[in-house]
Amino acid sequence: MTQGEYRVGIDFNPSSDDKVGQIKRMAADLIDLIETINSDAQSSDNCGAHAGEKYRLKALAQTAVEEAAMWAVKAATKPALKNHEGE
């Protein structure tokens, strides 16, 4: 299992909803792609600061994707509002 698959819970889809599966697959793939961005410092000047900043930016991006997937799954599975008036 990849980091992206783990973070979005790729196997958790109790309703077996195809749209949920697509959302999670795309989010997992993007998280994995972001993970491939090299955080290692390539130059000696400010190398630690630069690597730390890249790591921070990668983590923020991955968290944003994870959050977006969560909201998208909620939107895809939200039932219609029932009108309680007049029932």
Image: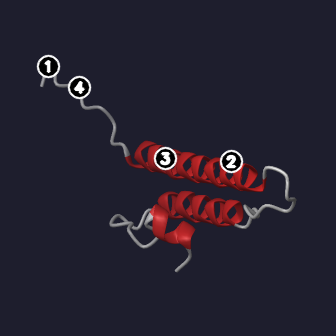
Number of the front mark, 4 or 1: 4
| Amino acid type, residue under disc 4 in the picture | Asn
Is 4 above or below relative to 27?
below
Give SS at disc 1.
Answer: loop
Report how far apart the C-alphas of labels 1 and 2 lie in the structure: 57 Å
Of pointers 1 and 3, the one earlier in the residue sequence: 3
Alpha-carbon span between mark 4 and mark 1? 8 Å
Residue 12 in the image, given as x and y percentages of width and height: 38, 68
Counting from the top left corner in percent of width and height, residue 17 is at 44, 62
Q: Residue 53: which numbered mark, if any? A: 2
Disc 4 to disc 2, how far (Cα)? 50 Å
Q: CA distance from mark 1 to mark 3?
A: 37 Å
- Expressed as whole percent of the image width and height from the top left, the position of residue 28 reads 58, 64
Q: Are marks 4 and 1 in contact (CB under 8 Å)?
A: yes
- In the current view of this chain or complex, which residue is farthest to the top? 85
Which dot, 4 or 3, sits closer to the camera? Answer: 3
Numbered badge on residue 83: 4
Q: Nearer the viewer, mark 1 or mark 3?
A: 3
Task: Compare marks 4 and 2 and give the one earlier in the sequence.
Answer: 2
Regarding mark 4 in the picture, which secondary structure is present there?
loop
Residue 87 location, quadrant: top left
With 80 as the anchor, is 69 left or right in this view? right
Q: Residue at x 62, y 61 (%)?
A: 31
Please tell me whether mark 1 or mark 2 is closer to you in this view.
Answer: 2
Q: Is residue 46 above or below residue 21?
A: above
Q: Amino acid at mark 2?
A: Glu
Tell me if residue 14 comes above or below residue 56 in the rendering.
below
Q: Which residue is mark 1?
A: 86
Amino acid type, residue under disc 1 in the picture: Gly
Q: Mark 4 vs mark 2: give the one in front.
A: 2
